[in-house]
Amino acid sequence: MPRPVWSGAISFGLVTIPIKVLPATENHSIRFHQFHLEDMGRVRTRKVCEIEDREVPNAEIGKGYEASTGTIVAIDDAELDDMPLPTAKAIEIVAFVPAESIDPVRISDGYYLQGDGQVSAKPYTLLRKALARNSKVAVAKFAWHGRERLGLLRVRDNVLVLHAMKWDDEIRSPEPIAPTPTELTEEEVEEAVLLVDSMTVDDIADQEWATDRYTAALEEVIHAKADGKKPPHAAEQEPAGTVVDLMAALEQSVQRAQESRGEGGEATVHEMKPKKAAKKTATKKPTKKASATKPAAKKRGA
């Protein structure tokens, strides 16, 4: 397990649970360095004092806030640790909510919470069982890295997990990019639901597609170039055509999904041919009068 990134306690009503916080995930991405292309010399980032014009070691670097132009307020770690904030040394549970009420867009990093010492065993187990039994998650507040954050506590394999969450004002509204109202037939919606059902799995673990193909391909490129060989390249792909028959695309997708799962169900596939513009116009706009009522029909469909 990695080293703890924070230690403190969970505040659960009048119950205190000493804990250590450990990262629940790890990054396997391949990291690149920057090099000067002419001579392949390493390009590094140096921290230079703009007044003395010299490189400054980390021991001489501190935190500061520019309160006004030219006025810097220095803040050291001791002052940050000594702030009068209840969550500075505790993960304070403020409420319990149904798990489905939390919008996943809020959730970011995940951390395992490890009981710190024998005294934590009983209250830790108590909170874990309480969460597991009523299928709820805990909403908490905690202060790390110079700011107070909102958190979510849940149970995973008998261990408490803490997820950092975004505050309300940190989540952008999706309203500006929402699609315009569009009419769909009930048959199209039902076929889309059938496609969802045919692609449903119980768990994403151990699925054939649940692998990082980008990193594997990047490793092939690196190994080939390191051996003086020509790196592999992507096969040419035909540009995707415009879908002119949504229903046919849905039925074909259902058939492919069923075949990939070894199911014997057959779906009727329509030939995907573009509809004639003249026929579409005749159906949609038979008269000027019908055209005038079209906006009202769209409003009802929206």
Image (tube, rainbow, N blue to C red):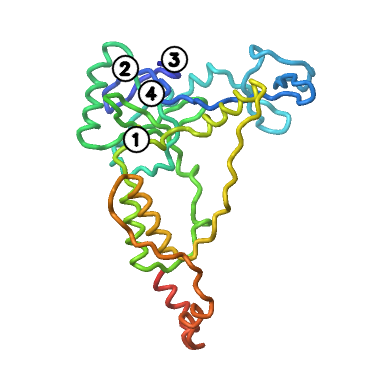
Q: Are marks 3 and 1 in contact (CB under 8 Å)?
A: no
- The amino acid type of the residue labelled 4 equals Ala
Q: CA distance from mark 2 to mark 4?
A: 13 Å
Give whichever of discs 3 and 4 has the lower sequence position.
Answer: 3
In the rendered structure, which amino acid carries the disc numbered 1? Val
According to the picture, the residue beneath numbered tag 1 turns out to be 139
Q: Mark 3 or mark 1: which is in front?
A: 3
Work out whether 278 lies above or below 235: below
Residue 3's disc is 3
Q: CA distance from mark 1 to mark 2?
A: 19 Å
**Which of marks 1 and 3 precedes in the sequence?**
3
Residue placed under numbered mark 4 in the picture: 90
Picture coordinates of residue 149 (x, y %)?
45, 32
Say which quadrant the N terminus sits in: top left
Q: Quadrant of the C terminus?
A: bottom left
C-alpha span from label 3 to label 1: 25 Å
Decide: few, some or many residues near mark 2? Use Cα within 10 Å; few <14, some 14-19, many ≥20. many
Q: Residues within 10 Å of mark 3 (few under 14, many from 20)?
A: few
Question: Tag 2 or tag 1, which sits nearer the N-term?
Answer: 2
Of 142 and 255, the residue lying toward us = 255
Q: Taking 80 as reference, is 204 left or right?
A: left
Q: Which of the two marks, 4 or 1, is nearer to us in this view?
A: 1
